Image (cartoon, helix red, strand yellow):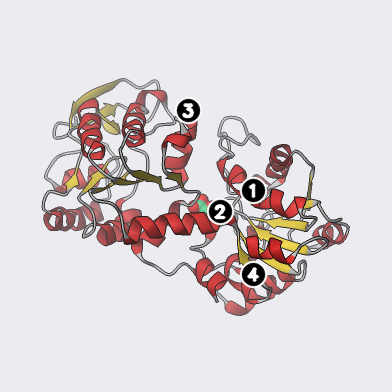
Amino acid sequence: LDDLLGEGVSGRRVLVRADLNVPFDKTNPGTISDDGRARAVLPTLVALRDAGAKVIVCSHLGRPKGAPDPRYTLAPVATRLGELLGSPVAFAADTVGPDAQAKAGALDGGQVLLLENLRFNEGETSKDDATRGAFADQLAAFADVYVDDAFGAVHRKHASVYDVPARLPHYAGGLVLTEVEVLRRVSQAPDQPYVVVLGGSKVSDKLAVIQALLPKVDKLLVGGGMCFTFLKARGHEVGKSLLEEEMVATCRDLLAQAQGRIVLPVDVVAATEFSAEADAVTVPADQIPADRLGLDIGPESVALFADAVGSARTVFWNGPMGVFELAPFAAGTRGVAEAITKIDGFSVVGGGDSAAAVRVLGLDESAFGHISTGGGASLEYLEGKTLPGVAALES
Ligand code: 3PG
């Protein structure tokens, strides 16, 4: 972005791919529950706006199926972005249609327009190169240059991320640069001891990253819904807890391969049902009653995990330890997150739910080394995969 600003952007049309895929409050439709991703792209938008560019922002939101779907409109995000920028953000009711064309054509230097959800168009996510390419042509026609600051989407081979940069002079935004630099540091030369904390619901989503990280880490702490498949693999009954039966054998292999470096909870908070009002008790991890499901790690596990984290010089954390959105099951995530803030070293929070947890639980964001905006993207980076969006910027 600095290179582009150095060239001068006054009056030029700049297409910015942002990741404005923000979570919404489930009980209060239309209300953004965590605007962290919108805040993260502000420096790029402010720099371009203040340098007099005509700024056209595009993003996806959720996973609509290639056609307009009012549940996934970016309209509330345009409003929020305008509040954050302190200047109005125009909103186009379509992505590349007549409204977008009219509003993009009417932009003056220093003005910002947000296009409607990219994924309302089947060309955005299509596996067919020609379909994606045709949509990329339409997007590219809006602009003279392209800036990618959507780190959260760089692992997607989508038109706005992968195909547009092949059609326009392209630049990395500051957020993408910072994210890649931090993850490169963590994956190539982490200060030792290196401890990884993984949570979230599914082992299958994290299998590739576990396999990639296991040879590099001193300890891999596993909490969240995925820990129950590991507990089962260790021979414990898990009651009604989340279980991926087909992954139990894989977890058994991973535990054997890890030779003690995978650390599992020793106690869990188990409830009769998935509800904040349900009767909840703390039980040893090998004694989960048949009629209960584990919804958080227990206090002894928090102490165990905090101890492991406390001696680390590098910590990477992805995935909550429990259902932190429900108050009775937030202590595990809070306790482990607080321990991470206290380390004498560098910590990275790997996007998605864990980044949201930091903000929703009111933790001090500045106490972490880096909070990534990319969940899947940061995991795929650590897996060592080539990220299509990064590769497209480098070519
Ligand atoms: C994310 O939430 O990780 C990014 O916005 C990418 O979203 P996606 O997983 O729907 O592609």
Please name whichever residue, 343 or 213, is drawn nearer the observer in this view of the structure: 343
Which element is circle 1 on?
helix
Please name whichever residue, 174 or 305, is drawn nearer the observer in this view of the structure: 174
Q: Residues within 10 Å of mark 1 (few under 14, many from 20)?
A: some
Upstream in the sequence, badge 2 or badge 1? Answer: 1
Q: CA distance from mark 3 to mark 2?
A: 23 Å
In the image, residue 25 lies at what x, y percent? 57, 34
Q: CA distance from mark 1 to mark 4?
A: 18 Å
The image quadrant that residue 116 belongs to is bottom right
Q: CA distance from mark 1 to mark 3?
A: 23 Å
Amino acid under disc 2: Leu
In the image, residue 44 lies at what x, y percent? 65, 52
Q: Check whether the beta carbons of the residues at disc 1 and disc 4 lie within 8 A of each other.
A: no
Q: Return the residue at label 1.
A: 43
Q: Which numbered dot is residue 362? A: 3
Amino acid under disc 1: Pro
Could you tell whether 189 is left or right of 171 in the image?
left
Q: Residues within 10 Å of mark 3 (few under 14, many from 20)?
A: few
